Amino acid sequence: MDLRLPRLRGPARRGRRRWFAAAAAVVVLAGAGTWTAVASDDGPAVHRTDRVMTTGAGVNIDTSFFTAGSGRRPAVLLGHGFGGSKDDMRREAEQLARDGYAVMTWSARGFGRSTGKIGLNDPKGEVADVSKLIDWLAKRPEVRLDKSGDPRVGVAGGSYGGAISLLAAGYDKRVDAIAPSITYWNLADALFPNDVFKKLWAGIFINSGGGCDHFEAQLCAMYNRVAESGKPDAQARALLEQRSPSAVGDRIKVPTLILQGQTDSLFPLGQADAMAKAIRANGAPVDIDWIAGGHDGGDPETSRVEARVGSWFDRYLKDDKNADTGPAFRITRTGGID
């Protein structure tokens, strides 16, 4: 099973199918990063800069920064799914760059070429890393600022990357809009529903992360303890709840597009429902889209989802009041009789 779905990949947004005519026109060393130009037959060339950033405690985060054209523009951070890396988000990043955004992708701790232990979106680890990335964006001449040190920035991603978008909005007030997909609101409730241990899914998490030793010690100990007993304890629930968006639900006050899968036994629709209720209670605009796919398979509706995320950011990052963000609630029917 692949925890990285959906990747928001495929045909270009707004129905235009774009094919790359040329790639890797030139690669040179530029400061601490590698610069690459990628040409296309539809839109300006996308420039990508790869660099490794140190976020403290000896942890290195592998990043890519994508821009096209000139002038300042809003920024978007794209988070990958569990077991993936920044490379999974490259195509989406290039498309958003052509559509007028400065886009950053990164490999979370313990994945890709990034170092550090996997913390399941630890506020002091992965979430703090995102704030460091926002600090970096605030210093870039390509990025539009709301004020000094505060870039206009949105965050999107699926599954693990969707959760980091919610957590980033809860912990960093500089985040202006988010678009989480097929993700969790309360990880303890997702893995321990009614105190039933989802052993299969938990095992997939551990294996996708490269084994227990690649996780923070307290997470590894928690997994071994619960796997042996077959039932979660209060300490296990508390540990996962502390790393869940629900822990900072009252702080998430930015426009939120929630895309949740109908075929998902890992993060079912109830997670999205709780998410929407909490964020709406804070007074933020919230739209909900139930897609046909999910962690159990089905159609991820890639091109439609990508288009809707782009329109969401057009409305709330570019301030384009004519952007069609779609209905407040949408569901894709996968069968049935009228």
Image (spheres, helix red, strand yellow):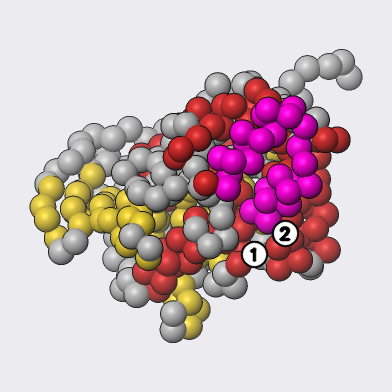
Residue at (76%, 37%) from the top-left corner? Answer: 232
| 53 vs 275, nearest the viewer | 53
In the picture, measured across the screen, residue 37 lies left or right of residue 334, that is left
Q: In this rendering, is residue 35 above or below 221?
A: below
Residue 44 is situated, as x and y percent measured from the top left of the image, at 28, 51
Left or right of residue 113, residue 277 in this image: right
Locate residue 162, reporting x and y percent.
Answer: 59, 47
Q: Position of residue 262 (x, y in %)?
A: 73, 29
Magenta segment's dominant SS is helix
Residue, disc 1: 170
Q: Quick check: is 86 in the magenta stretch?
A: no
Secondary element under disc 1, as helix, strand or loop, is helix
The quarter in which the N terminus is drawn is top right
* Residue pointed to by mark 2: 247
Give residue 335's quadrant in the image: top right
Q: Residue sitting at 66 percent across and 35 percent down?
A: 225
Compared to 247, does 158 lie above or below?
above
Magenta range is 218-245
Whether residue 193 is visible to the viewer of this picture, yes or no, is yes
Type of the residue with mark 2:
Ala
What's the amino acid at mark 1?
Gly
Number of marks in the rendered image: 2
Describe the element under mark 2 as helix, strand or loop.
helix
Distance of label 2 from label 1 (alpha carbons): 9 Å
Between 118 and 232, the one nearer to me in the picture: 232
Residue at x 36%, y 57% (from the top left corner): 59
Q: Do the residues labelled 2 and 1 touch (CB within 8 Å)?
A: yes
Report the residue that reaches farthest toward the right.
Answer: 338
Question: Which sits earlier in the primary sequence, circle 2 or circle 1?
Answer: 1
Which residue is at 37% across, 69% downward?
Answer: 136
Which-is-in-front pick, marks 2 and 1? 2
